[in-house]
Amino acid sequence: MTEKIQKTLRDSAAMRWGALILLSALTFSTYWFQDFFGGVKDLLLDEYGFTSENFGRIISLTTFANLFGMIMLGGILMDKWGVRIAGLLFGGLSAAGGLVVYLASIGTFGDEPNTVLWSMIVGRMMFGSGLEVVCVVATRTIVKWFKGYELALAMAINMGFGRLGSAMGIAVSPDIASGHFSTAVGFAASLLGIALIMFVVYIFFDVKLDKQNKEAAEEGSEDEEFKIADLLKLLKNSTFIYITLLCVAFYAAVFPFIQYAADLLVNKFGFTSALPEGANIVVNGSPALGNSLVFVGLFLFAIAFSTIPPRLKTNSQAFIARIAIAGLFALYIGSMWDVFSQWLDNGPKTASLIPLGSIIFTPIFGSYVDKNGKAASLMILGSLLLIFAHLSLSVFNNVYLGYMGLLSLGIAFSLVPAAMWPSVAKIVPESRLGSAYSFMFTIQNYGLAAFFWGIGAVLDLVNPNVIKITEGFREKFEGMGLAKEEVVAKIDALKLSGEIPPFDYTIPILILVACGVISIFLSFKLKQADKKYGYGLEKASNN
Ligand SMILES: NCCCC[C@H](NC(=O)[C@@H](N)CC(=O)O)C(=O)O
């Protein structure tokens, strides 16, 4: 008997990748809006008379609602109403939040610093309440289009768009602002608006795909409907709990570390904190534009490397293509080596290589997972690299080992996400994926909040001497009537001369080693569960 195979939009590679690009605009713009404040912090402080505490308040309150169930609410609504309504609702909330921040920045709600501050916080909170749900919408929708195809690669490229958004947001915003904070906000908010329009375009394809899926389902199996009781089933699934805990332990050891990495390199290995002249790639007189073009270039190489060779007919053609792309990449990096080599003893620049590296490596590992599977084993390997990274940056005092550690961390930061996120779709039925990803993100947010705060708290706790000496000097300089910036500059100079001793990061980073050990344990449990229940974590994506 010949079986009639119903083709749907997702069976066309062009349609799948087109859908991914339309969706990834949301990822790119939300990561940009989340992080660009860091690039224009000085401008924000100068223009509105804010303090660093005000800045910290704006940033930390952005995702406040997520700690109180906003992501879960979004995920449940998504599983009940589908990705279209959830995407419009929460993407719209993010864009509306962006607009409120913009209106606040041009003084629409009043010019008083406190009014501007609180109206910006309200806007950022609206944005943040949509942000993570938008991330779940994108992830869930990628599963819908790519399951059985290049799922891991698609998720990895989507993450790459996010990292690119963060990096470019920080790098280009000072140029875009050209002295006016509101201009940078207007631009970032417009990106959110454009991404929402692209999502509306995506909806037409989604409607068509759903229609085709329904027709196919009528001929075959029945569509499963989401029920709240399904959530409880999810929590009883021990494999899902392992992967959720892995997500918390792993990301807690990476995202917060990245924030402290520059300071660690300066304090532990004596890296510089200011960049020397000529240590930037300048395009049209703009280092920010130059840096951004480098990020885009790296991302394009990674996409070419991970998509072109697997599509070629023979292994030898694929091999030649890989060598050719890697060669071009080496030439590209080599042509800018004069600049890059100056980055390697600068704390902030070296620290920025970790997320930058993940723009390159995540798509490459995603493509590997699709072709060869081995996701659980790669999570074990990634956790091992994480342990090595944090050990080499804490207990040892060798700068070369430190570089190796950073490189390992960059690889782990690409390896584990590339293997972990697509694995969830193999563990959890598709009808519960929205709730599953939302649950993971919610727990992950608690872990991140604890570690962002915890590393700083432990650092202060184990370095009472440094705090005491620094405070002594601060009081002395303030007593002399020096301006805030002058006090900061004098303290920096005393740190450089060694009169103020460096912070000892050993204990805070050793705590992150413990996260790595927990990650390895959980990755082994995942591998065991995979053997027992046959989720297919070690199998290629189209199996
Ligand atoms: N397709 C998986 C997307 C998750 C990517 C992941 N982002 C997160 O985990 C966010 N919840 C956390 C955040 O962005 O702060 C990532 O690796 O960026």
Image (spheres, rainbow, N blue to C red):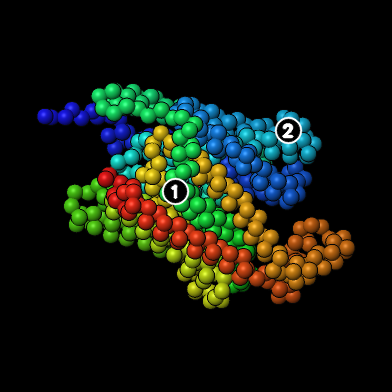
For the N terminus, the quadrant is: top left
Label 2 CA crowd tier, 10 Å (few <14, some 14–19, many 20+): some
- Quadrant containing the C terminus is top left
Q: Which mark is residue 216?
A: none
Q: Position of residue 427 (x, y in %)?
A: 38, 45
Taking the spot 55% from the left edge, 46% from the top edge, the residue there is: 443
From the top left corner, tell me how far across and down residue 349 is, in percent.
55, 61
- The response on whether ligand 1 sits within 8 Å of label 1 is no
Q: Position of residue 397 (x, y in %)?
A: 56, 76
At horizontal 69% and vertical 60% (from top left) the residue drawn is 457
Q: Is residue 55 above or below residue 256?
A: above
Of residue 403 and residue 215, the one placed in the foreground of this image is 215
Q: Amino acid at mark 1?
A: Ser
Count of numbered labels shown in the rendering: 2
Secondary structure beneath dot 2 equals: loop
Going 77% across and 31% down the picture, which residue do you hit? Answer: 110
Toward the viewer: 200 or 542?
A: 542
- Side of 494 relative to 345 (left or right): right
Say which label, 2 or 1, has the lower sequence index.
2
Label 2 and label 1: CA atoms lie apart by 51 Å
Mark 2 lies on residue: 107
Label 1 environment density (alpha carbons within 10 Å; few <14, some 14–19, many ≥20): few
| Numbered disc in front, either 2 or 1 | 1
Q: Which residue is mark 1?
A: 238
Give the side of residue 106 with respect to residue 81, left or right: right
Q: Amino acid at mark 2?
A: Gly
| Residue 278 seen in the figure | no
- The residue positioned 58% from the left and 36% from the top of the image is 70
**Callout 1: helix, strand or loop?**
helix
